[in-house]
Image (cartoon, rainbow, N blue to C red):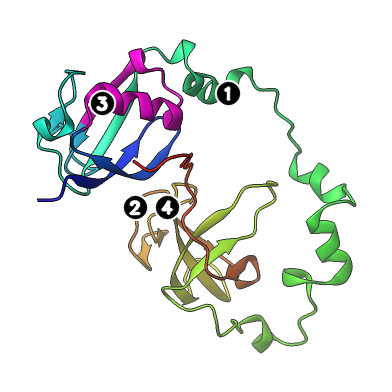
Amino acid sequence: MSSTVTVFVISPDTRSERRLDLHITVQQLKNKLELITGIPVQNQAISVFNTEGDTAPAAVLNDDSRPLGFYGVKDLQIFQVSDLNPAVSFTGQLSDVSQVEKFELSEGEYAQRQDTVLAYKQLHKIGRFAEKPDEEEETAVPEDIKVGARCEVETQEEGLHKRGTVRFVGPTKFAKGVWVGIEYDEPMGKNDGSVKGEHYFDCKPNFGVFVKHDRVKIGDFPVEEINLDDEEM
């Protein structure tokens, strides 16, 4: 039997895949997780779930002196790390957005600026601003936009990558033209693959979105995650 397992570690601000030695103690695990999650050792509460959708944990790592093998840890289980005192931890500082001074632009203000990607595309007639000589050209979709392809969706927020998988390409009942239905990796969408009662594809609520093809870039876009992998676990 292998002495190592692969698990998924989830905390309020992080999510990563880790390899763990079943011989290390809960205390040693917490020392490692502090570097990954930002939660101090004394504030960590670790629950083990068989799947992410489970409501009751398979085990609670409540004895720091016990090795992980004592709790029957298995491959692909979920280690949920809760913060018992977020007010004093690094993760609490990340989550408390009320202390962050935000820079915001309305859509009108953004449209008036000349130093943006939007202004560049308008000037050079790129993407959705390109001239379309006839109706047939408006319905054309690049050949690489296919169901199952990984993609990234254009956004006005600098540094934000909206990545996902193409789940639908074609005409819809909610608007004219051809639309691309995408299942985001994170809940940054607007629907579950259905619009106005019409079903187009399956995904979780708020993971689905429909956009025009000129906002979609196809490529090898891996799922992004916070992963401070400074040492193997």
Identify the amino acid type marked 1. Val
User: Mark 1 and 3 residues: CB-CB less than 8 Å, in contact?
Assistant: no
Residue topped by disc 4: 207
How dense is the environment of label 4, judged by Cα within 10 Å: few (below 14), some, or many (20 and up)? many
Which badge, 1 or 2, is on the more N-terminal residue? 1
- Say which quadrant the C terminus sits in: top left
Task: Please state the extent of the stretch shown in magenta in the rendering.
Answer: 24-47
How many C-alpha atoms fall within 10 Å of the one at disc 2: few (<14), some, or many (≥20)? some
Tags 3 and 4 in contact by the CB under 8 Å rule? Answer: no
What numbered label is drawn on residue 204? 2
The image quarter in which residue 20 lies: top left
Q: Residue at x 82, y 50 (%)?
A: 111
**Quick one: label 4 or label 1, which is nearer the N terminus?**
1
Give me the C-alpha separation between circle 4 and circle 1.
23 Å
Q: How many marks?
A: 4
Element type at marker 2? loop
- Is 121 in front, or is 212? 121
Task: Find the distance from the CA under tag 3 to the CA under tag 4.
Answer: 28 Å
Q: Position of residue 143 (x, y in %)?
A: 56, 85
Asked if labels 2 and 1 touch by Cβ distance under 8 angstroms, the answer is no
Report the magenta stretch's main SS.
helix
Viewer-side label of 1, 2 = 1
Q: Earlier in the sequence, mark 1 or mark 3?
A: 3
What kind of residue is marked 2?
Lys
Residue 132 placement, left or right of 96: right
Q: Which residue is mark 1?
A: 97
Q: Which mark is residue 46?
A: 3
